[in-house]
Image (cartoon, rainbow, N blue to C red):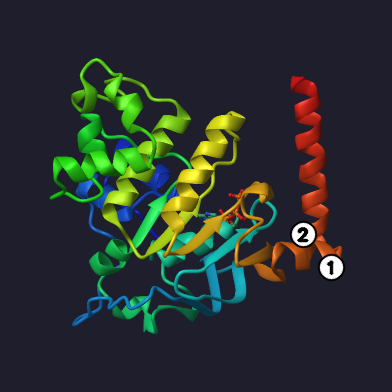
Amino acid sequence: MIQITMPLGFLGTVYREIRQALVDMGEMFDLLHQPSEIEDKPGANVLNVQGGEVVLENVEFHYDPTRPILKGISLSVPAGKTVALVGPSGSGKSTIGRLLFRFYDVTGGAIKIDGQDLRDVTQDSLHNAIGVVPQDTVLFNDTIRYNIAYGRANASEAEIVEAAKAAKIHDFIMDLPDGYDTSVGERGLKLSGGEKQRVGIARTILKNPPILLLDEATSALDTQTERDIQDSLKAMGQGRTVITIAHRLSTIADSDEIVVLEKGEIVERGHHEELLARHGRYAAMWARQSAEEEEAQEGAA
Ligand code: ATP
């Protein structure tokens, strides 16, 4: 079990909540001026990203030694390909995301990027290589420009605007009273879930990482917003290695590989069509979600 002794109280709660939400760890440490519990090994190398291939080799993990969470996960995401992790709540999807970002070290096996074990490289270089689009983008109490530019501190105005356009939030920003200078966050203009997600996408586009970790929102946004966001995410994924932690199967049907997890083990894997034809767990999940979506549509009509 990892002990968190500092900071206490409120900051401690914020710290744990943010970590759980799978936000960019680099940002978070800047925000809270907190050192990571995971330390760089002496003489750690800078991660040398070639194409961005991600490999999990027989990965085992537990938060608590009495309760194994991942029980020998092996998977490979070739450079530029997309893999979706699906499975019931608690099956270990987000945990895999946390390990890839090295919030924790694996307790067995290894995770490698372009052949380099995550434990052998500096955390800075690892965090630079991975863009995380979390379920809930954390906004800083600052201008919307600052919030986008957080993806890359030295970005020019033109680059910020370009990223905002690609994330389809530029027009929305231009309609705000102070444009890019509008204050957002808890003490400023409150943004909707979809708008916040677009800021997160713009931030990640600006960061331009070779590897993307998408933590899909559990609660569906309204359908048009959802479709637009999916389009932005797909466009951003072009030419990058993408791992999606998925809750709704309709958004990941075209992934290069779908990995079905259950209780910390891979129980099925393959393309969407292959998995449907197998009439196994994925096919059952698909049938259930399709029926639910139909019901919701009928209810809305
Ligand atoms: P969901 O679809 O609900 O997000 P998931 O598949 O992403 O679920 P994980 O968040 O990876 O599941 O959790 C896997 C298991 O690990 C769960 O049983 C959960 O209770 C446990 N777990 C997650 N985070 C911690 C933690 N910080 N400490 C102890 N146990 C944890």
- Looking at the rendered structure, the kind of residue marked 2 is Tyr
Does 286 sit above or below residue 128?
above
Taking the image as shown, residue 189 lies to the left or right of residue 21, namely: left
Mark 2 Cβ and ligand 1 under 8 Å apart = no
Taking the image as shown, residue 231 lies to the left or right of residue 264, namely: left
The one of 189 and 301 positioned closer to us in this rendering: 301
The one of 30 and 204 positioned closer to us in this rendering: 204
Residue on which disc 2 sits: 282
At 23% from the left and 23% from the top, the residue drawn is: 179
Tell me residue 154's x, y (percent): 13, 50
Does 109 sit above or below residue 293?
below
Quadrant hosting ligand 1:
bottom right
Residue on which disc 1 sits: 278
Taking the image as shown, residue 188 lies to the left or right of residue 221, namely: left
Does 208 sit above or below residue 99?
above
**Residue 6: in sight, yes or no?**
no
